[in-house]
């Protein structure tokens, strides 16, 4: 009895060492690129930073007080909120409806359609942005089609018109993200018992009734994931606005998002890295609050209610 306990403790120690040895690379990555990065960003918020000269000067909380007087931040928040308010519901609804239609076994050619329609998801965002800039150019296919149908008399400047530029980016974002979310919905619909649809049909339910009372409630946890992913993606939208505006957020700040504003302050002419860190933390807090509200409004992840 006295010899078995040291052997057992020694074996537990060896297993403990082996386990944490396997975890060490992942823990190191988390520590360096997550925990240490957050702490460094918080440190930057209290300083005037010059990365070239490697100087960090305490600024008496001026980075935080500047939030109250930054008019560009207000415009960026308005653009980002409007972008998310339109894109997230649209991409969620379209993805759900398309998945519901494609889940129908009677639809012909649905496998080929899934393959073709999923291609934009595999294409880089920068390439898609350039394609859309060509399509919506003043001499592009969209203007040519509208003029040939006599809907408009002269070309619309979609790229440099404050009324249209952000909306074009919205259309591109919806078009490029719907296939991914549609695939997620399709994967979930595979496990939905068809006996529920059969019972509903016996009660006289049509396709809309089955979608409303069976499919949507069943997919509520997946919808929560799709909505939260959409909110995070739209609030972090940067590359599309940067390419469309050449990094300026124009025309007249109509495509200026919070992420693009952070880039401008961090790497622009003023190099206000400390203030950019404040904006980055502010954006993280906003995303956290909005996602929590959206999760609560959608009924959570559905685990508690199941």
Image: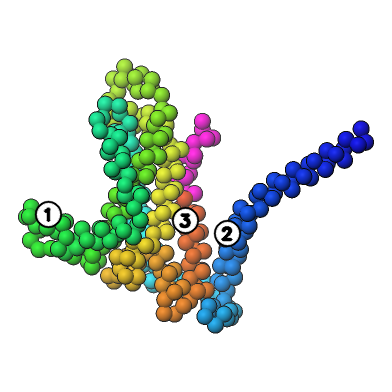
Q: Is residue 26 visible?
A: yes
**Residue 207 in the image: above or below residue 68:** above
Q: How many marks?
A: 3
* Nearer to us: label 1 or label 3: 1
Left or right of residue 306: residue 244: left
**Residue receiving disc 2:** 34
| Residue at figure coordinates x 44%, y 74% from the top left | 267
Q: Nearer the viewer, residue 21 or 200?
A: 21
Q: Which mark is residue 145?
A: 1
**Residue receiving disc 3:** 287
Numbered range of the magenta stretch? 292-306
Q: Nearer the viewer, residue 244 or 284?
A: 244
**Residue 100 in the image: above or below residue 249:** above
Query: Between disc 1 and disc 3, whose residue precedes?
Result: 1
Image location (x, y in percent) of residue 112: 28, 37
Is disc 2 placed on a helix, strand or loop? helix
**Residue 178 in the image: above or below residue 152:** above
Q: Is residue 88 magenta?
A: no
- Cα–Cα span, label 2 and label 1: 49 Å
Res 255 → quadrant: bottom left
CB within 8 Å, label 1 to label 3: no
């Amino acid at each position: 009895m006295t010899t078995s306990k040291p052997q057992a403790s020694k074996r537990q120690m060896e297993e403990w060492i082996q386990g944490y040895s396997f975890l060490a690379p992942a823990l190191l990555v988390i520590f360096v690129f997550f925990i240490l990065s957050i702490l460094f960003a918080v440190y930057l918020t209290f300083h005037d930073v010059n990365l070239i000269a490697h100087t960090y000067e305490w600024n008496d909380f001026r980075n935080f007080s500047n939030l109250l007087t930054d008019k560009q931040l207000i415009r960026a928040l308005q653009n980002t909120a409007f972008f998310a308010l339109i894109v997230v519901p649209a991409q969620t609804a379209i993805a759900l409806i398309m998945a519901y239609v494609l889940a129908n076994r009677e639809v012909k050619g649905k496998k080929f359609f899934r393959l073709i329609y999923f291609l934009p998801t595999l294409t880089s965002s920068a390439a898609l942005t350039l394609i859309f800039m060509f399509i919506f150019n003043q001499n592009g296919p969209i203007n040519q089609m509208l003029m040939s149908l006599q809907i408009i008399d002269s070309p619309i400047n979609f790229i440099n018109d404050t009324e249209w530029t952000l909306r074009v980016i919205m259309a591109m974002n919806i078009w490029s993200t719907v296939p991914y979310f549609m695939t997620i919905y399709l994967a979930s619909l595979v496990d939905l018992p068809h006996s529920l649809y059969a019972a509903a049909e016996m009660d006289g339910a049509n396709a809309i009734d089955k979608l409303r009372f069976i499919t949507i409630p069943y997919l509520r946890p997946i919808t929560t994931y799709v909505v939260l992913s959409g909110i995070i993606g739209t609030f972090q939208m940067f590359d599309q606005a940067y390419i469309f505006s050449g990094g300026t957020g124009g025309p007249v700040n109509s495509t200026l998002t919070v992420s693009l504003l952070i880039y401008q302050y961090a790497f622009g002419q003023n190099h206000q890295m400390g203030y950019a860190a404040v904006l980055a933390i502010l954006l993280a807090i906003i995303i956290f609050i909005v996602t929590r509200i959206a999760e609560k409004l959608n009924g959570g992840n559905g685990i508690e209610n199941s």
